Image (spheres, grey):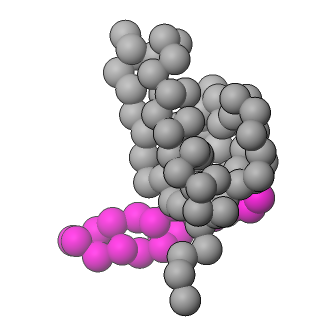
Amino acid sequence: MGPDCVHVNQLFLLPEHQGKGIGRRCMWLVMEEARRLGLPVRLRVMKVNPRALAFYQRLGFLRTGERERAAYRGGHQEAGRGLSGPDLLVVTSDPTHGDR
């Protein structure tokens, strides 16, 4: 059985490169490949980053869930330790959405 989505782990641009269409073009490439495969694109956005959430929503992503961020201590993942509830939003694209 194959994957059920194309997962974007992280997309970071230095502030001086933001707002120039670079991130949008990167995501279009990922979304185009996902469309070719018939899969949605899924990623996580921190709740405290409304600018990033708005960016993905402009690309057609929809909020589809919430997750707790994993804390790392001593090289081991400890999900949700020290957090009060989910702090990540899961957003997903529609693989059939062709608009840019």
The answer to whether residue 9 is above or below residue 1 is above
- Where is residue 49 drawn, in percent x and y? 60, 34
Taking the spot 54% from the left edge, 76% from the top edge, the residue there is 3
The answer to whether residue 61 is above or below residue 9 is above
- Where is residue 56 drawn, in percent x and y? 66, 36
Taking the spot 35% from the left edge, 21% from the top edge, the residue there is 14
The answer to whether residue 21 is above or below residue 97 is above
Asked if residue 90 can be seen in this view, the reply is: no
Left/right placement of residue 82 relative to residue 41 reads: left
Q: For the C terminus, which image quadrant? A: top right
Q: For the N terminus, which image quadrant? A: bottom right
Please tell me whether residue 97 belongs to the stretch shown in magenta: no
Q: Nearer the viewer, residue 57 or 95?
A: 95
* Residue found at the far front of this picture: 36
Q: Nearer the viewer, residue 6 or 14?
A: 6
- Where is residue 35 drawn, in percent x and y? 64, 53
Most common secondary structure along the magenta stretch: strand
- Where is residue 55 drawn, in percent x and y? 64, 29
Q: Which residues, given as a range, are shown in magenta?
A: 64-81
Taking the spot 46% from the left edge, 66% from the top edge, the residue there is 70
